[in-house]
Amino acid sequence: MPNNIIYIKKNSGELEPFYFQKLRDSLLKSGASLQTVNKVLKSIKPKLYNGITAREIYRNAFSLLKGYNKLHASKFSLKKAIFDLGPTGYPFERLVGALLKQKGFKTRVGVILSGKCITHEIDVLAEKNNYTYAIECKFHLKPNYTNNVKIPLYINSRFLDIQKQWNKKDKKTSILKQGWIVTNTRFTEDAINYAKCAGLILLSWDYPKNNGIKDNVDKYGLYPVTVLTSLTKREKKLLIENDIILTKELLKSSTVLNKLGFSDSKIRKILLETQNLCSLN
């Protein structure tokens, strides 16, 4: 291995080169200034060694950025925060439904529909301009999980079964137009190519380019409560269990913090961070 290159260990155990530019870009996208980003990178560089994990680098970067600006640290932690919505996929479905509402869709989460052959549970049903879309959400707990071509093959067969039944109804109020697949990880190239050919819409963390989940969450300010640095892991879980998924929901239903036994000083701290984060958009 060249002496001037640091190799990080992937979850698979394989080593790959670490690129400072990739970390720099992620830090800049959080809204941090170039000066702050350079300070973070300067502090991280001496801590790097061959075999260090990407998770350890992220933890160091997050901790350093948090010391400069908690709001930027919150935005920087978005990817991890979405994974922290688990272990069930329901909070992620709520997030997807909220994103679609921002785009002008009427949405319902967890809908049972009859197909020509069998019944199906649809994660999110979205309607706009007399067209309806059936959306399947694939939430994964492991960031290295990649959705292969079997996923769109399976989802497309379900969609076609529902579409045949839906569009033959005499009193239908809209046309079931298209199937979507949304994931918090990534798709393989074969999965993307099949979806394009079959007419499915795919949405992942960074796909389509400049219009993935991250871009949409930042655009509409639909941050999950799991980004908040003022909350512990247990407190985040408690809010999710009480159906508070998004920071905007927390602002509208802030009395839930009193009901859950948070102290007045803690509530002020949480709401200040939440208001500041939501005001960025």
Image: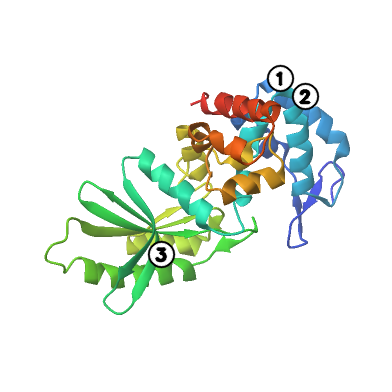
1 and 2 marks in contact (CB < 8 Å): yes
* Front residue of 122 and 37: 122
Q: CA distance from mark 1 to mark 2?
A: 6 Å
Label 1 neighbourhood size at 10 Å, few (<14), some (14-19), many (20+)?
few
What secondary structure is found at the residue carrying circle 2? helix
Residue type at mark 1: give it. Gln
The amino acid beneath tag 3 is Tyr
- Relative to 154, is 165 on the left or the right? left
Marks 3 and 1, the one that precedes in the sequence: 1
Residue 234 horizontal/vertical position (percent): 70, 47
Residue 127 placement, left or right of 6: left
Q: Which residue is mark 3?
A: 194
Q: Label 1 belongs to which residue?
A: 35
Give the residue at x 57% y 24%. 276
Helix, strand or loop for disc 1: helix
The residues tagged by marks 2 and 3 sit, at their Cα atoms, a distance apart of 44 Å
Q: Amino acid at mark 2?
A: Lys
**Left or right: 94 with respect to 229?**
left
* Badge 3 element: helix
Mark found first going from the N terminus, 2 or 3: 2
Mark 3, mark 1: which one is toward the viewer?
Answer: 1
Task: Give me the disc on residue 39.
Answer: 2
Q: CA distance from mark 3 to mark 1?
A: 43 Å
Q: Quick one: label 3, few (<14), some, or many (20+) residues within 10 Å?
A: some
User: Is residue 89 shown above or below 160?
Assistant: above
Judging depth in this view, the residue of 198 and 178 nearest the camera is: 178
Q: How many marks?
A: 3
Q: Is residue 80 visible?
A: no
Residue 65: percent from left, percent from top? 73, 29
